[in-house]
Amino acid sequence: MKQVTIEKERYYDSVFLMLISKEVEALPGVNSATAALATPSNIENLTRIGFTSPDLLAAGPNDLVVAIDAESKEALAAAQARVEEMLTEKKEQAATSSARPSTLSSAIDSLPGANLALISVPGQYAARVARLALRKDLHVMLFSDNVAIEDEISLKKDAVGRNLLMMGPDCGTAIINGAPLGFANAVRRGSIGIVGASGTGIQEISSLIDRYGAGISQAIGTGGRDLHEEVGGMMMLFGIDALATDPDTSVIVVVSKAPAQSVAEKVIDALQKLDKPVVVQFIGEASRPPRGNITFAPSLAAAARSACEKAGVKIEAEDESDAQIERIAASEYEKMSPQQHRLVGLFGGGTLAQEAWHLLSVGGERVYSNVALNKALKIAGDEHVDGHVLLDLGDDIFTQGRPHPMIEPSLRDEHVLALVDDRSIAVLLLDLVLGYGAHPDPAAGLAAAIAKVKKAFEERGGYLSVVASITGTIADPQGYSRQRSQLEGVGAIVMESNDVAARLVLKILSHVAMEGGR
Amino acid sequence: MTAKNGVFLFSEKLQVINIGLDGFGHTLQEQGVPVAMLDWRPPAGGDPELIKIIDHLRSDTGDGWQEKIMRANAEAISRLLAAKPMIKGIGTAIDVVPGMKQKMILHAGPPVDWTQMCGPMRGAVIGGLIYEGLANDPREAEELAASGEITFEPCHHHAAVGPMAGVMTASMPVWIMENETFGNTAYCTLNEGLGKVLRYGAYSTEVIDRLNWMREVLAPVLADVIQAHGPIDMKSLITQALQMGDEGHNRNRAGTSLFIREIAPFLVRLDRPREEIAKVFEFLNGNDHFFLNLTMPAGKASLDAAANIEGSSLVTVMARNGTEFGIRVSGTGDQWFTAPAPMVDGLYLPGFTADDAAPDIGDSSIAETTGYGGFAMAAAPAIVQFVGGTPQRAIEFTQRMYEITLAENNAYQIPALGFRGTPTGIDVLKVVDTGIVPAINTGIAHKEPGIGMVGAGLVVPPIECFRDGARALAERIVKQSN
């Protein structure tokens, strides 16, 4: 059904009318739609496609012609209405924002004071982008992983030569001038500076420092490989130097996953020369006696505590005491059934997993893990294991094609739910990492999974002890208290730190070992 | 190190360029940190071999290549900017166009055989042969075109350019555009108007009649006018037109008006019948695109002066024949790099749809190559519907082109961008690196010969020809270094 209408002296821009035609033609049941000025050529074209009307032939170039061919009366009316609507619709005020820059040069043109590039592009391009940024005299935080170690070495050499920070590759966390870069927690500013080759290590220490009442001056990430032999601690040493000269930093904390011995010594040598107090936490290393200005902490929490003391801050919040831990352990053990004896640890934070494994090992437990530092206990992660097991679910083997559990926690929730029929488990140990970049409400799904599994155990006459710690602060977007109450609401024991959580687990396991399963 | 001198990041205000996950940048913005959010995409389309080439050519690796290219580009762009295209007059193609022959037809774009020509170009060839009296009807014309008796060559091989099919035959009148700075000349036919016209592949009697009138009346009249007036400075006219809402490719209303204003006193003083002069005025007034056939040779004359500079990555030609899109790069001389012609994303005239459209065609993309047309979109709010409907989008369009160009124009300016010079001089290496292709405004021809224009819009050139151009440039530089 074809209809053509003419409106005298109704002039519109021809391109505007073409745009209307295009949109109206896309409506259902519309075969063709034309809104146009009645110029001789338009009249000719409309006549050619079968629109005939004496009015059309008499119309002039300042007259509006609307010609619609539709399958039904309704479609025709709808199309005509839409034409009118588009003709009379008020134009939205154009936004004032301009095009996003596509190159580093134009990004710098748009922000001439830029001093840091935060890079999170796919690994194969990351080194190239970082190199360009360094050449533009920008400090770099390189969140991307899968960067060749040769590239890391050359980038860091280049950066040190230019007196620039080259944080990463694989640097998850930094706090510069109070601003959270990547995954970082909302911590108050203060006088404690951190250099860390470990993302969640920095997060745990800085969150606890905040909870204990002190604050962070700067937190510099170096990337996980910085203290490997090949890289030689280049950025760790550079970061230490930067904090040493920073007037706002009075205490320095150094944290790293198991460093190469030679590099660890180099770092300690550098630290010894400083006139600022230093706390060192090398995860997986046996505690060392203090050396001059350096205190070696046995855990991340101990490092945070020690740093606060050195900064002269009186610690407000206290961790659970040994007596409290004993009391909780006893009451948790009470409710278990005889065949329950195993520990399962399911972690999202890599450093937290490694710390927990280390503390459990020091406590005498043999725990299979994909982060085990002892080869005999090292597993890939997905195999079945008889005995205690602790998994870093952020490992590549689990995250192939899936987001990291800190961003999208369902991966871990699924692992928790999978425990539902395993009668051998006594304790489930968990971490929960909050902060910028992390999932907006990670406790919700986790609490639901815990509730389901706990219920299954109780229905069988047993009891699953769930022990967790939360890395985060009350100012974090997820809210520490809100996350904590969700876990506690389903009967999980939430401890103040990963350290005390591991100690509680040790206590429960010692009951199991001494008294046997009930 | 400066840290010891107390100048370090910690004492500055943190300002971040975020490259990659937008979420990290947004978090910083929420914390009050100034952030530039880079719209990152894999370099060179993620092709590792090409990335290596680009990085090698664009960074200081000690072999002097980067410096060679930079020096060559500085020379090329300074020639492009120094160009001074002037309308010198009107001649007949066979008399003035270098290498033109009686049985030769020039066409738009890279070389193409009769058998490979798209509908509108075939139509224009048919019309051209009838116009020349070489054929009496379309059937004869097709036979002749297929016989091998007619030589087909690109306009660009003869210092010429042509819109859409770009067909130029021996007896057609052509504009003579001289680049006064460098002494080279470019040529282009006179614009026939819209609707059923030869350049869109129409060849009916009315088309041929109009071409005859243009040769017999319009061209001699305008030739006399230019003679009386003296050479007309095109750079000045284009500059003014851009400040009056034209972009010099899809909108030429202001330019055409300025041209009429410029010649009017000389036109009315001619010793010719009043009716003839009135007809010329009418014709010019009825054809908003009359100025296009002047902006095009102005661009060609300017760019030819920047061609063939050893080592330069400046794109000197972008042209389409309806079958292929092709470019030429200054440092690789006359070599064409081609890929199949894309379709135009456009808006359609009443009675036509995308099904009627021929692939992208014409030499008019010389406008963008020179630094106007789509590159000056921000100057032409009246036609922003072609790029998504808002003046803001038009500004973004122009702003993006600064990412792939070597300079800002010294004459052509954009009022809406604070009179910033238009992005000028496409760098093939920047195109390949960023993956940003030149934004080209264009008309759309009907796919069948003989029908004409069906719409207008925007075309995304195929990136492949730019990649081939970059590779060829690299090979040539390597060869010369050895």
Image (cartoon, helix red, strand yellow):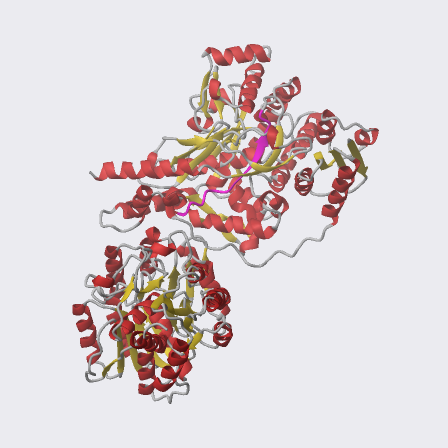
The stretch drawn in magenta includes residue B444: yes
In the foreground, B196 or A347: A347
Depth check, front residue: A185 or B123 = A185
What range of the chain is rendered magenta? B434-447
In the rendered image, residue B459, in percent from the top left (x then y), is placed at: 52, 38
Residue B300: x, y in percent?
46, 35
Which quadrant would the C terminus of chain A be assigned to in this image? bottom left
Residue B31 versus residue A12 in the image, above or below: below
Residue B134 falls left or right of residue A259 = right
Q: Is residue A26 among the parts visible in the rendering?
A: yes
The image quadrant of residue A285 is: bottom left
Picture coordinates of residue B11 (x, y %)?
Answer: 37, 75
Which residue is depicted at the point 74% across and 43% down? A83
Image quadrant occupied by the N terminus of chain A: top right
Looking at the picture, does residue B57 appear above or below residue B10? above
Image coords of residue B157 (percent x, y): 42, 27
Identify the residue shown where x is 37% and y is 88%. Answer: A313
Q: Nearer the viewer, residue B303 or B20?
A: B20
Q: How many marks?
A: 0
A198 in relation to B289, above or below: below
